Amino acid sequence: MSLMNQKKSVEINVLRKKELSMEKIYLDNGATSFPKPKEVADAVYEYMTCCGANINRGGYQEAYDLEGTVFETREMLTDMFD
């Protein structure tokens, strides 16, 4: 094994040990929880009946507007978990 491969192997092992020692937080319970809060159903219904655009796939105003909404939501979530 070359010196470079040995260094990579050591780095990978260090990262794996670090991962094992970190506490994991499961944030994807929205995919499995039931029933969903009414606010979630309302938001999905509003999207399906008022917009329905695909962000990052459409070159039209509705897609750009929705992309802005997603970005703002991500910023709010970042502030919550910062």
Image (tube, grey):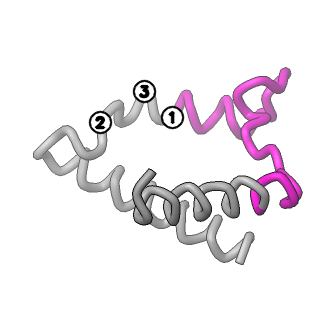
Q: What range is drawn magenta here?
A: 18-46
Q: Secondary structure at mark 3?
A: helix
Mark 1: amino acid = Glu
Q: In screen coordinates, is 60 left or right of 19? A: left
Q: What residue did someone put label 1 on?
A: 46
Q: Quadrant of residue 39?
A: top right
Q: Looking at the picture, how far across and down is residue 72, in whole percent?
A: 48, 66
How crowded pointer 3 is (Cα within 10 Å; few <14, some 14-19, many 20+) is rated as: few
Q: What residue did someone put label 3 on?
A: 49
Q: In screen coordinates, is 70 left or right of 64? A: right
Q: Decide: marks 3, 1 in contact (CB < 8 A)? A: yes
Q: Decide: marks 3, 2 in contact (CB < 8 A)? A: no
The Cα–Cα distance between marks 3 and 2, rounded to whole angstroms, is: 14 Å
**Nearer the N terminus, badge 3 or badge 2?**
3
Mark 2: amino acid = Asn
Residue drawn at the location 55% of the way across and 28% of the way down: 45
Q: What residue did someone put label 2 on?
A: 54
Q: Secondary structure at mark 2?
A: loop
Q: Looking at the picture, how far across and down is residue 60, in whole percent?
A: 13, 45
The Cα–Cα distance between marks 1 and 2, rounded to whole angstroms, is: 14 Å
Q: Quadrant of the C terminus?
A: bottom right
Q: In screen coordinates, is 59 left or right of 11? A: left
Residue drawn at the location 51% of the way across and 34% of the way down: 46
Residue drawn at the location 11% of the way across and 45% of the way down: 59
**Nearer the N terminus, badge 1 or badge 2?**
1
